[in-house]
Amino acid sequence: MNENKSHKPQEPRTYRYFAYVCFKDSKKMYSFGCDDDHYQVGDQVVVETIRGQELGTIVKACTPFIVNQNGLETKPLLRKATKEDQEAVKINEEKAKEALVICDKLIHKLGLEMNLIEAEYTLDRSKIIFIYVADERVDFRELLKELAAVFKCRIELRQIGVRDETKILGGYGICGRELCCHAHQSEFLPVSIKMAKEQNLSLNPTKISGVCGRLMCCLTNEEETYEVLNSQLPSVGDTVTTKEGLTGTVHSLSVLRRLVKVVVNLENDEKEIREYQADELKFKPRRKKQKISKEEMKKLAALEKGEGASKLNDK
């Protein structure tokens, strides 16, 4: 007689401390479990990830361990990196460059529509990850077979989007500075057309799209400030009363300086443009919806949906 035995799910392993680690040039921080808190900021360590063993750097002091309430497993910090580990990373980087060339040749040989970006070995070289960009889904089964025959290890082919491609490759924005995503951003923040309108920017897609062809990440940098300031200002076209008791219509605004240009009504039906501090006017703070043409709306909607063309390969 067969008995159905119920097995309790295995409890996730617990540790005494969390260690906080970043990898390579990434600014994103990951937490790993450890039983010692002697690790210092800047120490190189070997950790177990879903990809395998990898070398990272401690970026924050250890904190007491807290069990993950959603049941997710906390991966372990294995050890402090040795000279052998650091040497292995250098060798892996050289081998990854060679692997990139080999994989690229196989892609062209098989006629696959994919753009290879990067190759990376895990620390123990049990796995190699090839990162690529493609407009559509790629059937890379034949490529996978050929790669496995060449490298004799586990192969992972990972498709990424144009924003991630830009983050990896880097570059310079129209401001002349290094791209935010590559220089300091740990992850992508949601960006919307509303942010450009709130900051009174030109709604020309070529002016507010980045190298990746999507809305510029830096639109989020001053969004909160503009929201607060705009809530304290009239809108263009609003009727206001000046400190002299004159009425007028808002002509234009300088949001950051809180200056308002007003077309005031004088005697004998004369009008004059005068500039005032916002505090010198009486008005009802409110924001009007900015009118956008249908053609502009289509282009802007494409940017928001991520349909803009990447400019990485522009010359």
Image (tube, rainbow, N blue to C red):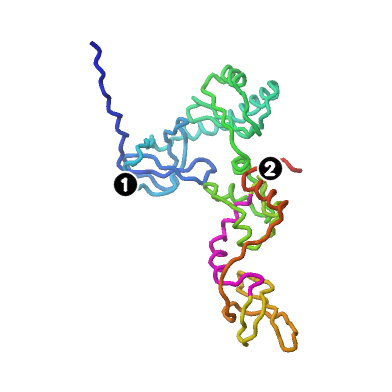
Looking at the image, which residue sits at the far front? Answer: 269
Residue 64's disc is 1
Q: Secondary structure at mark 2?
A: loop
Whether residue 27 appears in magenta in the rendering, the answer is no
Task: Measuring from the top left, give residue 44's x and y in whole percent.
Answer: 45, 41
Name the element at disc 1: strand
Against 150, residue 29 (above or below) is below
Q: Quadrant of residue 110?
A: top right
Q: Nearer the viewer, residue 54 or 154?
A: 154
Between 204 and 161, the residue placed more toward the observer is 204
Mark 1 residue type: Pro
Q: Position of residue 203 (x, y in %)?
A: 69, 57
Q: Residue at x 70, y 54 (%)?
A: 207
* Vertical position of residue 74 compared to residue 256: above or below: above
Bounds of the magenta span?
A: 215-238
- Whether 221 is among the magenta residues is yes
Q: Would you say 297 lies left or right of 44 here?
A: right
Packing grade of label 2 (10 A; few <14, some 14-19, many >=20) is some
Residue mark closest to the camera, 2 vs 1: 2
Query: As rendered, which of 62 and 2 lies closer to the eye?
Result: 2
Quarter of the figure that contains the C terminus: top right
At label 1, counting other C-alpha atoms closer than 10 Å, the crowd grade (few under 14, some 14-19, many 20 or more) is few
Q: CA distance from mark 2 to mark 1?
A: 44 Å
Relative to the observer, which residue lies in front, 147 or 97? 147
* Residue at image mark 2: 310
Nearer the N terminus, badge 2 or badge 1?
Answer: 1
Answer above or below: position of 247 versus 193.
Answer: below
The amino acid sitting under disc 2 is Ser
The answer to whether 78 appears left or right of 212 in the picture is left
